[in-house]
Amino acid sequence: DGASMASPGPPEPTPTQSYVDEDINNSNILGQLIPQFTFPSFRVRDTMSYIQRLPPELLSYIVELVCLLEAPAQTQAAATILGRVSKQWREIVFNTPAIWTSFHVSKGVNPTNLEVLLLRSGGLPVDVHVVDGVTKPTEVRDQLDALARHSSRWRNVEISHPAAFTLFENSIPWALPKLQSLAVEATSKRLPPSLVYYYESILEWPLAPDIRLGWKNRMYPFLQSLDLCDIEVKLRETEDFLEFLEAHGSLERLTFRRIWELDEYTPSRTAVLPHLKELQLRGIPSSEILRWVSAPSLHKLVVEKSPQLRLWTPVNIESNYATATNITLIHFSTAPDALLNILRAVPLASAVELVSTDLRSRASFSTENILIEHKLFHLTSLYIQGVTSLPRLKAVVEVHKDTLKDVKTHCLDLGLPRESDSENYSERDEALGWLKDQTTFKFDISHSLDAFGGHYRCHEDQRCGKQMLCGGTRCRISL
């Protein structure tokens, strides 16, 4: 009877489980953790491997960490592989909801299987990703319809597809009570707005579809991040979109990339977003878009000028972004007036980046003159791509040396023979020595290795038609 009262022995391990157990035992990772756990039967404990001695709750936590270390698209695949080790592991994997909360719509997925996976996620919020551009829109819609049965739990939605805005219009519910992040990007090739009227008949460059996104009826009360890429701004919807922004005052991050605007639209009002911390306007076609939003708590502002924003285009953003401290301006060397107006509108700017592949053009003198004549009283970090010369950089730094702590320049014309139009190299040497000897700020030059005595390479600057000093064969900045 005493033998019958004893606890039964552990189940016979499968070959895969035996291999895993042996690998863990040899590593002795869990050896120090085991003594703190008590078991009802010492005989069973002695015959079990380290991994078998772990309580199911701890093993579930380990499985969760391992799966979440994988890329989001591979989380569920990793869980499936772990579930093949043994029956115990399969039960633990299936009962760990956190690893079943990321759903990637892709080619060949059966929509009926998504319901099973959604049940494994319990009641946790889920993320929906449509980033497989080769999946047909009909397949995407079928899978999104299956996921929409649990749309009340959608937390993050990402759509990057040639038919992104058509899918957004037809397959994304208008009410998502737990949505925190929404990103929509159309990846199809389209004509630049300036060429639409001339090349409408070219089939390989399709026009933007005539769709209505229904901003007026959409309600995402907890939305914190909104990213729209390659979207056409239509006059009949702009007012609705501004109302949508006003109704979502919880927004903390707003990004527009490659906005399409065939007809410049002047908004009747400005949408105030009290909690907005980061605003990115990439490839803006007109200055009016800068006045769509007012952010009294803004921290980071990124503005990229498109070719449609001309040299003479006036920019007046008033005090919409007056609290911004981190400023990045791209391609503004060809619009010095707009650059000056933006810098005037951000008096608290402490970190400024001027990023542009055309800063080495003749207009770059205007950029440096603006930084010399318009002092930024709180500037601590300055990054400029393409300063025309070291003496010019020195003049800019001297104006702000009382507050500067970090100065960095990229692809600098150092004035070396045959690679520069400069003739007075003593002035260059004096400026370089002055910048390097300063102790109040850090000075760094990237893609110009010879500034500190090393070797350098030359590459042809296609925009300016002259040789520039660079640490590589190509000189590009990506943000």
Image (spheres, rainbow, N blue to C red):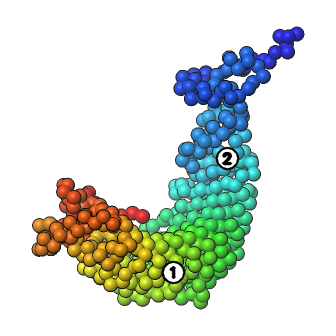
Q: Amino acid at mark 1?
A: Ala
Residue located 62% across and 34% down the image: 82
Drawn side of residue 417 relative to residue 167, left or right? left
Residue located 60% across and 35% down the image: 81
- Above or below, 98 against 341 in this view is above
Q: Amino acid at mark 2?
A: Ala
* Number of residues whose C-alpha sits closer than 10 Å to that of mark 2, classed few (under 14), some (14–19) or many (20 or more): many
Task: Pick the residue in front: 452 or 413.
Answer: 452
Per the image, label 2 sits on a secondary structure element best described as helix
Residue located 62% across and 76% down the image: 274
Instruction: Give the quarter of the figure containing the N terminus.
Output: top right
Q: Picture quarter containing residue 379?
A: bottom left
Q: Position of residue 205 (x, y in %)?
A: 44, 70
Can you tell which mark lies on residue 59?
A: none
Residue wearing tag 1: 322
Q: Position of residue 11 (x, y in %)?
A: 72, 20
Q: Position of residue 44 (x, y in %)?
A: 73, 18
* Number of residues whose C-alpha sits closer than 10 Å to that of mark 1, classed few (under 14), some (14–19) or many (20 or more): many
Residue wearing tag 2: 98
Per the image, label 1 sits on a secondary structure element best described as loop
Instruction: Give the quarter of the figure containing the C terminus.
Output: bottom left
- Above or below, 59 against 170 in this view is above
